[in-house]
Image (cartoon, rainbow, N blue to C red):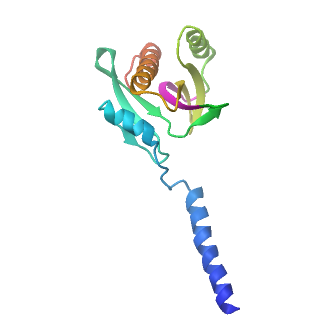
Amino acid sequence: MLRKTLAFAAAGLVLGGVFAFAQVGTRKIESDARVEKLLKDAEIKYTVDNEGDFKIYMKVRNDRLQGMWIISETQNVGSLEVRQVWSIGYVSDAPLSPAVTTKLLEQNAKVKLGAWQERKMGDKYVAVFSAQVGAEVDKFTLLTCMSAVATTADDMEQELSGKDVY
């Protein structure tokens, strides 16, 4: 009986440690090998964060750099598997002003791929340009999506702030 109790206690400590480890957010999630292959084939430099997402800096017009993320986690819409590609265009300490929100919504009606979203990240309010792309996308399509996202976000960043931060 003591042996069983010790075995259950040990299993509880091991499992409890696994669950606690997963809850604190220090566990590294694996990146999507499909994205990794496409980026390597395209000879694009990237890093992978603890959530398994790909961080890329792309050159855009006038030698500006724009950071973007390709999310490894996918979502299903019926039989379609999609992932998000996004980039920051504007950051504020307060919720986005009506003027900025109107500008973003007006641009949403003009872009061919993607849309502006407001997200709360920590104590900041962030305008993110995001596009959905098929998870089984080919290299050319992914690069086209990345270019559209980076350029759109960078154009808005330059228009609203005049800076090259994101």
At horizontal 41% and vertical 17% (from top left) the residue drawn is 151
Q: Residue furthest front?
A: 79
Q: Position of residue 54 (x, y in %)?
A: 43, 38
Of 16 and 162, nearer the camera is 16
Q: Residue furthest bottom?
A: 2
- Specify whether residue 54 is in view: no
Rendered image quadrant of residue 57: top left
Residue 19 belongs to the span the image colors magenta: no
The quadrant of the image that shows the C terminus is top left
Of 164 and 72, nearer the camera is 72
Residue 87 belongs to the span the image colors magenta: yes
Q: Position of residue 146 (x, y in %)?
A: 43, 24
- Specify whether residue 63 is in view: yes
Rendered image quadrant of residue 19: bottom right
Horizontally, residue 83 falls left or right of residue 161, namely: right
Q: Position of residue 66 (x, y in %)?
A: 38, 25
Of 74 and 155, nearer the camera is 74
At horizontal 67% and vertical 30% (from top left) the residue drawn is 78
Rendered position, 86 above or below 104: below
The quadrant of the image that shows the N terminus is bottom right
At horizontal 50% and vertical 46% (from top left) the residue drawn is 51
Horizontally, residue 67 falls left or right of residue 12, namely: left
Rendered position, 155 above or below 85: above
Q: Which residues are magenta?
A: 81-94
Rendered position, 12 above or below 3: above
Rendered image quadrant of residue 101: top right
